[in-house]
């Protein structure tokens, strides 16, 4: 999990060619940020593994696009602000993690489709079908097919956005993604046929989620 360097992805690809049952996952912040962001903007960009160079980030995209990295997630880490405040604590005592659950889809879509000119199906492969298959949930999750849960995200591919602190819906009042701009915003989310988010705001009932056990192999 959290593959941040192309050398690790290369090793996974080689292992798969040799027959190993292994896949990889990366986080969207490794695909849109670099170590330069940490050095210039501070501890908001502190995560583990750390951010890498621009060259590494660009190379990592190859393994996302060819399917070596089957999943792109958030590694959401939405703690309270004080433990991440480098005016109160030395940087080595600060917590790790970049809060991204709310913003990864739009950032991934913008970079993958509008910047790198991939098909939008790459998003469904890496954020839906890929992880569902790997965690043995496919058949209930991961596709729009008869018998699957009606989990749907409607995304406006041309809707412009800017990540702003006042729009964040989690405990932290800041995000490394704050200030980013792009095109392609989710406007409606359904879970098992029920609308749980609309116009970039959650509207579902607490407790509506369900734990799902992986299917037996």
Image: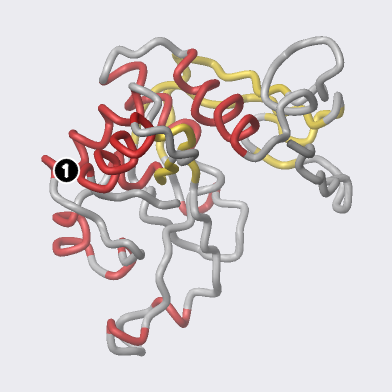
Image side of residue 131 versus residue 110, left or right: right
Q: Nearer the viewer, residue 105 or 187?
A: 105
Q: Nearer the viewer, residue 27 or 166?
A: 27
Residue that badge 1 annotates: 56
Whether 114 is drawn above or below 29: the answer is above
For the C terminus, give its image quadrant: top right
Whether 77 is drawn above or below 208: the answer is below
Q: Quadrant of residue 64?
A: top left
- Is the image coloured rainbow, by chain, by secondary structure, or in one colour? secondary structure
The residue that appears at 32% across and 17% down in the rendered structure is 114
Image side of residue 150 versus residue 100, left or right: right
The residue that appears at 19% across and 53% down in the rendered structure is 52
Q: Quadrant of residue 51?
A: bottom left
Whether 178 is drawn above or below 184: the answer is below
Image side of residue 4 versus residue 192, left or right: left
Q: Residues within 10 Å of mark 1 (few under 14, many from 20)?
A: some
Q: Where does residue 142 sit, x and y in percent of width and height? A: 67, 25
- How many tags in the picture? 1
Whether 191 is drawn above or below 207: the answer is above
Q: Where does residue 70 sit, x and y in percent of width and height? A: 46, 32
The residue that appears at 65% across and 40% down in the rendered structure is 135
- Element on which disc 1 rests: helix
- The residue lying furthest to the front in this view is 18
Q: Where does residue 201 sit, x and y in percent of width and height? A: 67, 40
């Amino acid at each position: 999990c959290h593959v941040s360097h192309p050398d690790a992805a290369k090793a996974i690809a080689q292992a798969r060619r040799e027959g190993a049952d292994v896949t990889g996952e990366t986080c969207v912040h490794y695909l849109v940020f670099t170590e330069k962001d940490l050095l210039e903007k501070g501890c908001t960009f502190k995560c583990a593994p750390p951010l890498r160079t621009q060259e590494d980030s660009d190379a990592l995209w190859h393994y996302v696009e060819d399917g070596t990295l089957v999943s792109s997630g958030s590694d959401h880490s939405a703690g309270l602000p004080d433990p991440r405040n480098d005016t109160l604590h030395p940087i080595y005592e600060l917590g790790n993690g970049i809060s991204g659950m709310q913003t990864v889809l739009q950032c991934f879509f913008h970079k993958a489709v509008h910047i790198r000119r991939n098909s939008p199906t790459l998003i469904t492969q890496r954020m839906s079908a890929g992880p569902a298959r790997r965690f043995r949930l496919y058949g209930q999750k991961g596709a729009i097919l008869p018998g699957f849960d009606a989990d749907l995200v409607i995304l406006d591919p041309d809707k412009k956005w800017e990540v702003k602190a006042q729009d964040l819906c989690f405990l932290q009042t800041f995000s490394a993604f704050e200030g980013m701009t792009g095109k392609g915003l989710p406007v409606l989310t359904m879970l098992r046929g029920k609308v749980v988010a609309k116009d970039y705001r959650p509207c579902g009932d607490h407790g509506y989620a369900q734990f799902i056990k992986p299917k037996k192999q």
